[in-house]
Image (tube, coloured by chain):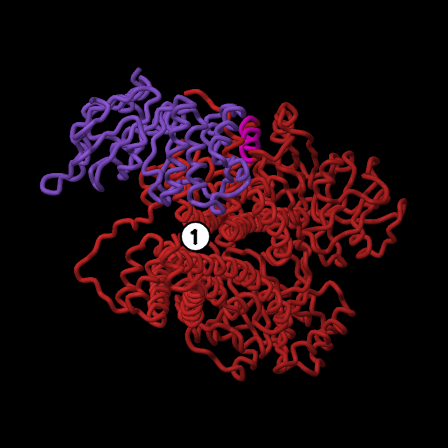
């Protein structure tokens, strides 16, 4: 076919159609704007979530490189380094050696002594801001926190003496004095404080680590690499390739992608939910834009028919509709992008601030709001796709418009309707018929309204589902909890709550109850029965144990002694114990002749007892003391007050605090718990801040107040996204309803006028229209309830409600509560439309066509 | 020379008892430059005949050949393009595109074809039809007679092989009808334009070169054959 140059004409026609449809244009622009707003804010929100999480993780886990290899033996390191150097994907890499944990009783945090080159130090975010990395054997670069703890002035050339652990298994330590050649401001929020030594020192003094030790979790002397690639594409594949080439075949060995950059990490980001949300936005946008175009094309169908008549082809007509859509998008999308970005910008802090609920006031969370052009590009593209899909039907309609039919329409002929014999003539019956006459359009209106109802309902379900109580029970056993423990076992302080601090706490006037948990590690000679119990347990759990844990079991078996978590507890803590079987009385327990023991498989349906009540437990203390106790009962320490680190073969034994003091001669506690008097949480917190933290600012304070605030922030995220969605969806739903009623009234202008002519009163007609509205909304309600009953639960539980403290309660109360609003809308809009139309006289309405 | 030839045209709606033969074996030839009137009562099939000749509708059987091209072999798309190049329509309802002004309406078919407008020719039509002062107006601002003149101008602008007019005076008063018909006659002569017009008004029909009468889908008389 000859290609003809008629763009100019089509453009003119498009322009004229636009001019003819001013009201439609405004509605359509708003709809398109909303769609692109939703897409943009969705993308800004999720990309910001990813980036913020990445920034937080980079900071927290001290790794800004793209991939890392840790704990390598010398020969593995050589192989890996060669592969990295040969890879053309790698931009640069850093290397380092882990020497061991720094040891000092003044450290309240973990300290690591390492060698690192410049790249490696950078990946830890620990480059000296003053001075440089060490070069000579006696030089160190240190975190300011380490110096502070050791009481050394941060100054180049100053001497510092450090002790570090060469091998924790062999209990081998090394102490050296160094000269400070660099330091930087340490950050308490990160995993550990670094001490950089020179390569020469590291090579000479590091433990000659082998595969065997590495397998058992002894990493001292292990080499490490950090790698930056040229770009962020396909990190997983690149990393895997390097590992494979270097001969690392097992999973989790060799080079691994930095979790901060691993988008597919289970908990980092759910692509499925993003896709679901994108589809949801497409659907929401489609529902309204589709309706707008359908209605406008139907109204203008005569004009399209005439154009076809004078020789405009179907393709050209389609193009005219498309061009209108693009023109409207040209206006709507940029506005939507801007507002979407603003919305995303405003939401990001609450989206990212509390990915985790924390009971501690300190925050490490970073908020990064992304303005990547790709976001806007993708949002614009998806909006265009939505618009394209939405006008498919309208395009088909104009493409197929028959020129002869257009003539008929022009001559004012009504399209033929099937007339059923049982035509009802009550206003109610007519309303039902009208709705069914146009059931496809009706269904779309119902769906779009139902959609907003479902979302409102789901959000309420979601927010109700987050159960503070069940969260609090796990994280905190009391209103306040104090300790001085670190995230890892090394350098943790089991005796952080010293008698001085206890004294301060005991004096707190607003506290209701104060309790303490004391910890010491002891060993216990196993009775034959206990050995047997453990053998059964070991058999069951062996496959989950690491070699190291298996080795511990072997040792336990060999000398027939089991590790004991020996806890002293005060009355307040005693009241919090979770009992298996009968609870005993504090008064009996207090005497000091009894112990409470825990049981195995605590969190399962069938816990296994180590001892029965009434049995005798012989305790041989590490300091040589011995005592026979009666087992008074079995109980478990609340999760938040228990020994917090992973351990495999042990039993927990509890005695009252007085007995603990007598036997261990140690009065410093692991935890302090405080319950405030009713409503005096704030005062207690102030008291702690003012008195305890002044005494020792390394104490961690977890409070129900901070947790509540953080929980509220966590839930408010859903409120926020939710209300945002609800407003937009409600708007779309109401607009759709408004549109539908408007067109159904306008397109039946003549019909309604004729009804009036034959004697139907205005009141009856308006009743009929209102009844139609009720039918639409009633339908929407039914659809919404069905969707909630049969779909919402699965979707919620699998996407947003994965947290352990999420309990879903199926409810349609929000939907029911919306009924009055819907009724109002169903009443007001049709009435308004009809009254607007009634301003014209009947004769005018009949004549016009 | 034959500009239009219809061979054994049939158009049947419905089936069995409800079957309606709108056209029942029509054979017709029209010479270039002829001004033909088709007359008949309501429902005689004259509008159907015009639609089929103009490629707006398809016959159940039979063939239409316009300017040597067989319409029955064309797709919908081809038919539309054929229409805008070869057929000009004038309807009782004028059928101007409501959102385009008079000038735009007139040149629309030419522009849709991507052709250059022959300004001299179009201006001549405009002057002949006396609508020069209305070029900027929208159709809604014109009287019925004026709208029909615009419709005729539009139909002529593309230099169609045939101009088809369906009751062009049906909505006009008798004075205006006379004027419009006079204009059609003038164009037929001046531009050597073939015109096929439907009317049920004998008086109007008398002003043409040739009158065909249709009854029940068949041509019952043809003044041209006498």
Q: Residue lying farthest top?
A: B1
Circle 1 Cα neighbour tier, 10 Å, few/some/many (<14 / 14–19 / ≥20)? few
Q: Which residues are magenta?
A: A236-245
Residue located at (74% from left, 71% from top): A689
Chain B in the picture: what colour?
purple
Residue at image coords 48%, 53%: A557
Q: Quadrant of residue A87?
A: top right
A843 left or right of A494 in image: left
User: Which secondary structure class fits the magenta region best?
Assistant: helix
Which element carries disc 1, helix, strand or loop? helix
- How far across and down, in percent of the image, does residue A409 sit? 34, 46
Vertical placement of residue B8 versus A329, above or below: above
Residue A678's x, y, as percent?
61, 82
Kindly tell me whether residue A532 is visible in this rendering.
Answer: no
**Near-viewer residue (B106 or A199):** B106
Q: Is residue A239 magenta?
A: yes
Q: Residue at x 74, y 47 (%)?
A: A194
Quadrant in which the N terminus of chain A appears? top left
Decide if residue A134 is in sight here: yes
Tell which chain the image draws in red. A
Name the one closer to the observer, B21 or A209.
B21
Left or right: where A176 falls relative to A269: right
Q: Look at mark 1 in the image and give the residue it sits on.
A: A541
Taking the image as shown, residue A720 lies to the left or right of residue B20, namely right
Q: In the image, residue A246 lies at what x, y percent? A: 57, 27
């Amino acid at each position: 076919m000859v290609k003809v140059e008629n763009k100019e004409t089509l453009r003119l026609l498009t322009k004229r159609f636009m001019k003819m449809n001013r009201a439609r244009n405004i509605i359509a622009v708003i709809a398109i704007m909303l769609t692109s707003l939703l897409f943009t804010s969705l993308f800004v929100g999720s990309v910001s979530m990813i980036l913020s999480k990445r920034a937080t993780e980079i900071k927290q886990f001290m790794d800004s490189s793209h991939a890392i290899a840790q704990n390598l033996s010398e020969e593995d390191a050589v192989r890996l380094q060669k592969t990295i150097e040969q890879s053309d994907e790698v931009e640069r890499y850093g290397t380092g050696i882990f020497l061991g944990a720094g040891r000092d009783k003044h450290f309240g945090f973990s300290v690591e002594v390492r060698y690192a080159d410049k790249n490696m130090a950078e990946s830890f975010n620990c480059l000296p801001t003053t001075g440089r990395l060490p070069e000579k054997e006696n030089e160190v670069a240190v975190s300011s926190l380490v110096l502070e703890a050791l009481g050394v002035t941060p100054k180049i050339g100053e001497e510092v003496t450090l002790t570090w652990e060469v091998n924790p298994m062999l209990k081998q330590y090394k102490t050296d004095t160094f000269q400070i050649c660099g330091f930087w401001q340490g950050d308490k929020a990160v995993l550990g404080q670094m001490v950089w030594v020179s390569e020469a020192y590291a090579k000479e003094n590091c433990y000659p680590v082998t595969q065997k030790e590495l397998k058992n979790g002894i990493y001292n002397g292990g080499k490490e690499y950090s790698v930056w690639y040229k770009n962020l594409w396909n990190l997983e594949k690149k990393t895997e390739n390097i590992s494979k080439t270097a001969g690392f075949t097992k999973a989790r060995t060799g080079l691994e992608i930095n979790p901060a950059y691993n988008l597919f990490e289970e908990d980092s980001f759910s692509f499925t939910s993003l896709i679901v949300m994108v589809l949801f936005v497409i659907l929401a946008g489609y529902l309204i834009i589709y309706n707008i175009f359908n209605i406008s094309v139907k109204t203008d169908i005569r004009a399209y028919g005439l154009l076809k008549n004078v020789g405009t082809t179907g393709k050209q007509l389609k193009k005219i509709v498309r061009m209108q859509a693009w023109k409207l998008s040209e206006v709507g999308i940029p506005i939507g992008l801007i507002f979407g970005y603003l919305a995303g910008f405003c939401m990001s802090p609450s989206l990212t601030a509390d990915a985790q609920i924390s009971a501690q006031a300190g925050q490490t969370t970073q908020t990064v709001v992304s303005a990547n052009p790709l976001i806007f590009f993708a949002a614009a593209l998806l909006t265009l796709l939505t618009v394209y899909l939405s006008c498919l039907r309208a395009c088909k309609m104009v493409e197929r418009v028959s020129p002869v039919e257009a003539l008929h329409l022009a001559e004012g002929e009504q399209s033929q309707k099937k007339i059923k014999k049982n035509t009802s003539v009550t206003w109610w019956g007519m309303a039902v018929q009208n709705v069914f006459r146009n059931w496809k359009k009706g269904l779309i209106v119902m769906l779009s309204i139902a959609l907003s109802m479902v979302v409102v309902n789901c959000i309420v379900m979601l927010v109700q589902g987050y159960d503070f109580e069940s969260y609090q029970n796990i994280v905190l056993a009391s209103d306040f909890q104090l300790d001085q423990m670190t995230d890892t076992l090394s350098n943790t302080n089991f005796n952080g709550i010293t008698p001085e601090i206890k004294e301060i706490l005991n004096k707190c006037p607003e506290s209701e109850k104060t309790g303490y948990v004391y910890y010491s590690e002891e060993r216990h000679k196993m009775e034959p029965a206990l050995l047997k119990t453990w053998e059964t347990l070991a058999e069951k759990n062996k496959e989950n144990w690491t070699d190291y844990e298996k080795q511990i079991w072997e040792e336990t078996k060999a000398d027939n002694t089991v590790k004991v978590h020996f806890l002293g507890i005060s009355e307040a803590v005693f009241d919090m114990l979770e009992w298996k079987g009968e609870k005993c009385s504090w008064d009996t327990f207090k005497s000091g002749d009894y112990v409470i023991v825990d049981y195995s498989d605590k969190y399962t349906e069938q816990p296994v007892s180590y001892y029965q009540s009434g049995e005798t437990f012989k305790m041989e203390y590490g300091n040589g003391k011995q005592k026979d106790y009666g087992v008074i009962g079995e109980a478990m320490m609340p999760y938040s007050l228990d020994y917090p680190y992973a351990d495999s073969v042990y039993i927990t034994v509890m005695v009252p605090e007085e007995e603990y003091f007598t036997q261990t001669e140690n009065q410093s506690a692991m935890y302090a718990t405080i319950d405030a008097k009713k409503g005096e949480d704030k005062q207690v917190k102030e008291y702690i801040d003012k008195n305890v933290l002044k005494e020792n600012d390394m104490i961690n304070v977890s409070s129900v107040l901070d947790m509540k605030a953080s929980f509220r922030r966590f839930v408010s995220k859903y409120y926020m996204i939710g209300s945002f969605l609800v407003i937009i969806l409600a708007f779309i739903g109401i607009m759709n309803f408004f549109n539908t009623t408007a067109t159904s009234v306008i397109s039946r202008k003549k019909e309604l006028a004729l009804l009036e002519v034959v004697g139907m009163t205005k009141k009856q007609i308006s009743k009929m229209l209102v009844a139609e509205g009720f039918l639409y909304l009633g339908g929407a309600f039914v659809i919404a309830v069905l969707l909630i009953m049969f779909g919402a639960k699965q979707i919620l539980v699998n996407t947003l409600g994965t947290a352990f403290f999420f309990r879903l309660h199926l409810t349609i109360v929000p939907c029911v509560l919306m009924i009055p609003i819907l009724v109002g809308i169903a009443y007001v809009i049709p009435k308004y439309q009809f009254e607007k139309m009634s301003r014209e006289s009947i004769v005018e309405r009949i004549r016009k066509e | 020379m034959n500009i239009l030839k219809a061979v054994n045209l049939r158009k049947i709606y419905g089936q069995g008892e409800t079957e309606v033969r709108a056209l029942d074996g029509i054979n017709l030839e029209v010479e270039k430059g002829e001004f033909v009137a088709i007359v008949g009562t309501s429902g005689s099939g004259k509008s159907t005949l015009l639609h089929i000749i103009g490629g707006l509708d398809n016959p159940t059987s039979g063939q239409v050949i316009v300017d040597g091209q067989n319409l029955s072999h064309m797709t919908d798309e081809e038919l539309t393009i054929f229409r805008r190049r070869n057929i000009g329509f004038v309807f009782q309802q004028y059928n101007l595109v409501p959102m385009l002004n008079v000038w735009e309406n007139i040149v629309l078919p030419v522009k849709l074809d991507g052709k250059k407008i022959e300004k001299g020719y179009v201006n001549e039509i405009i002057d002949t039809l006396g609508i020069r002062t209305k070029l900027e107006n929208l159709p809604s601002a014109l009287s019925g007679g004026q709208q029909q003149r615009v419709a005729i101008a539009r139909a002529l602008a593309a230099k169609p092989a045939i101009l088809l007019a369906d009751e062009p005076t049906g909505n006009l008063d008798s004075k205006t009808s006379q004027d419009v018909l006079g204009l059609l006659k003038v164009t037929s002569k001046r531009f050597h334009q073939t015109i096929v017009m439907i009317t049920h008004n004998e008086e109007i029909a008398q002003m043409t070169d040739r009158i065909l009468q249709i009854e029940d889908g068949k041509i019952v008389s043809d003044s041209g054959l006498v």
